[in-house]
Image (spheres, grey):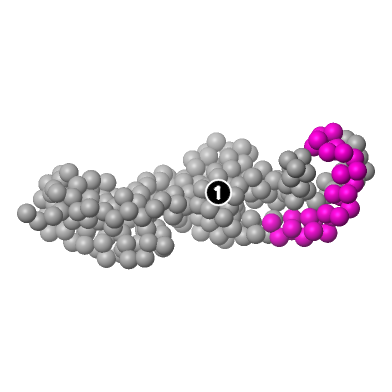
């Protein structure tokens, strides 16, 4: 029965709703398309189970949020209480999947941004994107990369990201409830990818600006010597850099030999 299911979902989010429904069965019957008798029966029989389920659901969702997005959750906790965070951000998301976690993280970021100073919004956006990227990679099927005909190419699941602040360090400071003003305006660069030797594992590597530029050019269209020329580097240096990246588990395909 859709009305009863909706009432159950609301009660899982807020078990105190059962007291209100028990005191006003006619009003809740009207609202959810039930009879007053059905509302009374629901409130009487469902109370212990609903309260226990609500507590478990709430605890589990906060645990998942803290595991996937501790930085965004910390930003949110600075401007909103736990009830608002749960009801507005965590409850609507099916957090057992990467897509559900992305939805929850995005909602948390929106809630944090709502009360943030204008200067904090770019940092919040960077933290959200930093914590969403691994979920995007995790949610993608790992596809084997065909060796390019011309030059090095990143795997289909590899994501490159540039941030306007020292996002990884700021995230750690947020978790520790420490100030991070000194870490603003410090661009950082990351590679996020499935580990080529263990696809279930997602790698998050901070890289230098120069390596970020090199990897951004690795779309298979340029041979190594042309990449080196474009970057003003030696061919051997480019080959060593790509070998180091492959050694970390990031999928970088090399050109087929004629």
As drawn, 256 above or below 79: below
Q: Is residue 35 magenta?
A: yes
| x and y, in percent, of residue 247 in the image | 27, 65
- Residue on which the image places disc 1: 100
Q: Residue furthest left?
A: 258
| x and y, in percent, of residue 218 in the image | 23, 48
For this rendering, which residue is in front, 95 or 69?
95
- Give left or right: position of 4 versus 209: right
For this rendering, which residue is in front, 92 or 82?
92
| x and y, in percent, of residue 41 in the image | 88, 49
User: In terms of secondary structure, where does tag 1 sit?
Assistant: helix
The residue drawn where x is 32% and y is 66% is 197
Q: Is residue 61 magenta?
A: no
- Give left or right: position of 53 versus 253: right
The residue drawn where x is 26% and y is 53% is 145
Residue 233 makes an appearance in the image: no
Residue 11 makes an appearance in the image: yes
Q: Which residues are magenta?
A: 28-57
Q: Residue furthest front?
A: 1
Q: Quadrant of residue 237?
A: bottom left
Q: Quadrant of residue 1?
A: top right
Q: Quadrant of residue 30?
A: top right
For this rendering, which residue is in front, 88 or 188?
88
């Amino acid at each position: 029965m859709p009305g009863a299911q909706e009432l159950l979902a609301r009660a899982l989010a807020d078990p105190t709703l059962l007291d209100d429904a028990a005191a006003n069965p006619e009003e809740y019957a009207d609202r959810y398309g039930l009879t007053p008798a059905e509302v009374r029966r629901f409130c009487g029989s469902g109370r212990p189970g609903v309260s226990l389920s609500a507590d478990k659901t709430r605890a589990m969702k906060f645990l998942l949020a803290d595991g996937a997005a501790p930085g965004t959750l910390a930003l949110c906790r600075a401007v909103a209480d736990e009830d608002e965070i749960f009801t507005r951000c965590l409850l609507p998301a099916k957090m057992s999947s990467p897509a559900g976690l992305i939805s929850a993280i995005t909602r948390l970021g929106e809630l944090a941004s709502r009360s943030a100073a204008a200067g904090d919004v770019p940092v919040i956006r960077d933290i959200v994107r930093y914590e969403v990227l691994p979920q995007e990679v995790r949610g993608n099927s790992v596809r084997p990369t065909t060796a390019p005909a011309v030059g090095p190419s990143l795997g289909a699941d590899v994501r490159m990201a540039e941030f306007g602040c020292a996002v990884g360090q700021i995230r750690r400071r947020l978790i520790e409830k420490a100030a991070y003003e000194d870490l603003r305006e410090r661009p950082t660069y990351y590679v996020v990818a499935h580990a080529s030797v263990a696809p279930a594992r997602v790698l998050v590597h901070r890289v230098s600006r120069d390596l970020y530029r090199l990897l951004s050019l690795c779309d298979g269209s340029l041979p190594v010597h042309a990449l080196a020329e474009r970057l003003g580097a030696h061919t051997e240096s480019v080959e060593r850099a790509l070998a180091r990246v492959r050694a970390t588990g990031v999928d970088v395909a090399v050109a087929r030999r004629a």
